[in-house]
Image (spheres, grey):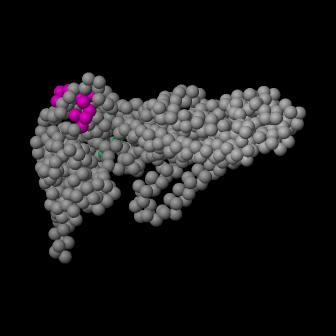
Amino acid sequence: MQAIQDVVSRRNIDSLLRASPPPPPHTQPKHASGIGSKGNKFRAPSGRARRLGSRMSLPSHAPTAAAPFNGVLIRRLFGLAWRYRLHCLQVLGIQLALLTMGIVGLSFTGLGIDYIRHKMDGTPLAANQLHLSLPADWPPLHVLGLIAGLILVLALGRALLNYTYAISINVLVQQKLVVDLRGEVYEKLQRLSFRFFDANSTGSIITRVTGDVQAVRMFVDQVLMQSVIMVISLTVYVIYMASLHPGLTLACLATTPVLWLMSAWFSRKIQPEYAHNRTLVERMVQTLAESIQGIAVTKGFGREAEDRAKFEAANQACFDQQRGIFWRLSLFTPAIGFLTRINIMVLLGYGGWLVAHNRLPFGTGLIVFAGLLEQFSGQINNVVNIVNSVQQSLIGARRVFEILDAPVEVKSAPAAVRRPRLAGEVRFENVSFTYDGAEAVVREIDLTVQPGQCVAILGATGAGKSVLMSLIPRFFDPTSGRLLIDGIDARQLNLDDLRRNIGLVFQESFLFSNTVAANIAFGHPEATSAQIEKAARIAAAHDFILGLPKGYDTVLGESGNTLSGGQRQRLAIARAVLLEPPILLLDDPTAAIDSETEHEIFEALDRAIAGRTTFIVAHRLSTLRRADFIIVMEDGRIVQRGTHEQLMKADGPYLRVANLQLVDGRELQQLKLKGGAA
Ligand SMILES: Nc1ncnc2c1ncn2[C@@H]1O[C@H](COP(=O)(O)OP(=O)(O)O)[C@@H](O)[C@H]1O
Ligand SMILES: [Mg+2]
């Protein structure tokens, strides 16, 4: 009977408690839809703060704003690479060895050719760059065999070194840098306040932790390392070529400045494209995240086709934009390639003339030169990759650093007071709180709750009940006024101590895909199985847990889907009371549960509340009546307070709600009697 009564009453409570007309649509609270928001009904919708232009919201990347900060960004990235300097040096060392071996191999080839010419038509052997002298008394084939053997050994050595290089750079970037950086970003995310998660979409955060971290890696291996390698190689090539013939070197490299100019121009063109690309990818991930989150709603309303179209549009936008980038890139690469071919033309003309006039040896001169120029062009082509990677990695890096730099609003004070065990006195002193700096959602609250007292909060949706409670564990800090716990300003208390002294149960509880025991012990992994069982007994969960296939070791499906609402809430209560916290916050824990099941957890709640300072958001008279006192909230203010008996005597919102429940109850009883008689 009681159960049916509740269904009827709750429907009307909101309208009764709402003194003023309902707020305009844009201030109406609505349910959050982001992945991260599921378990936390203290927070409101993720879209809201974005609209309010919260200062916690990460910028979406306006291409024009990006340019001026590149210097700072690059310096930071260098700083990051500096942490791995030893490993970087090792990788560079390998590259240097490869470079040397390549050049020596090339010289051997030239030497071999000159030797063949010498034996065939008596052309004198020129003094070569390596100052090698061939054994004059060996038969020619033996000499050639020696040269070929040396080239082979060098080639083998290079193959081995290339292999080492590939492994070494992979260890550096994928196993060290990316893992460390991802860990750092994740750790930071754990410390950021709810305001941050309200202001930033799940999609944006996920792309930053996954894709953008890879972009930072790209800076280290494809920009930094490649640039250093390129500069060293180019220098060595130029010096070697100049030592062969300065004039020919100058002539061949005349096109190089054009290449640099083109690269610089291309780089500037392509950067905004990459910035835009990240935003589009972010949007696509967000669409995906939302559609997974809301799959039940989508299917329920038969909107799969629209959903698919929405995702396809986001996907297509990414694709189109990426095609634009690809198109430019495909033009740029051959253009650079073409320019470097001009060098070979010059070499054949001018170099050939030099050889014909005996001013340059053929093998150790022209052939080696051609080889060097080929390598040089290869490195220049690399510029395209580097330029391309620079832009991509800078955009990604900026987005990663934005998370790393986001201000941690709520943190322990430097000399925070340690209180491993609080008594549980909670005092609000003229506390107000606002999300956007304009409209307070909690106003001028003065309230003292003695240790062990239970205070029930009654109020319409959006009255500020959840926000008020979220100030206690410092999910937010009051905008003005003070919150004192055991007489100490909450901001002065060690944050871990404070939160470990508080147990929380939300309207709907998020359970992790883990065992029942691990879910109960979530906040305190060190808890013993005896403690876990005790908590489960308090929460009236022990019996149903034993009924599960593997008892406490049963692994729950994603977000605990395999349990009923009542069971989930009882696990949540067990989780909250595990370490017997002196303060307990219950935000309408029976809201998402049908009234039949509701009864299952009342006994649990009663036991959980006993002896703890408890704040409970409740609508049922039976719960309200049990509280030591009740506060009624309206528009962020406390409009009524007192015990059930006192409030029943005063004309006000409490009496209206109570009467409605009583009337509903009687009417229902009559209806039921009639129904039963018929
Ligand atoms: N993350 C948020 N950003 C901006 N406004 C919020 C946010 N969360 C709640 N609000 C606003 O604060 C007010 C109080 O919300 P809340 O405490 O959740 O109400 P309830 O009493 O239903 O628990 C509401 O007007 C709501 O719109
Ligand atoms: Mg609420």
Residue 411 point in image, percent of width and height: 32, 31
Quadrant in which the C terminus appears: bottom left
Specify the quadrant of the image occupied by residue 563.
bottom left
Which percent across, then down, holds residue 672? Answer: 18, 68
The image shows residue 213 at horizontal and vertical percentages of: 48, 41
Q: Is residue 184 above or below residue 541?
A: above
Return the residue nearer the eye: 244 or 184: 244
Question: Can residue 495 be seen?
Answer: yes
- Position of 207 with respect to 387 (left or right) is left
Left or right of 365: which side holds 547? left
When asked about the image quadrant of residue 598, the answer is bottom left
> At 32% from the left edge and 46% from the top edge, which residue is drawn?
40
- Residue pushed farthest top? 415
The residue lying toward the viewer, choosing from 140 and 602, is: 140
The residue depicted at 37 percent of the width and 49 percent of the height is: 31
Q: Quadrant of residue 645?
A: top left
Numbered circles on residues, count: 0
- Give yes or no for residue 523 being in the magenta stretch: no
Q: Quadrant of ligand 1?
A: top left
Residue closest to the eye, 618 or 648: 618
Examine the rendered structure and indicate whether residue 11 appears above or below residue 179: below
Residue 329 percent across, percent down from the top left:
68, 45
Seen in the image, is 66 located left or right of residue 496? right
The residue segment tinted magenta is 486-499
Single out the residue that lies furthest toward the front: 137
Q: Residue at x 17, y 57 (%)?
A: 541
Is residue 487 shown in magenta?
A: yes
Q: Relative to 420, is 592 on the left or the right?
A: right
For the point 29% across and 42% down, which residue is it?
Answer: 466
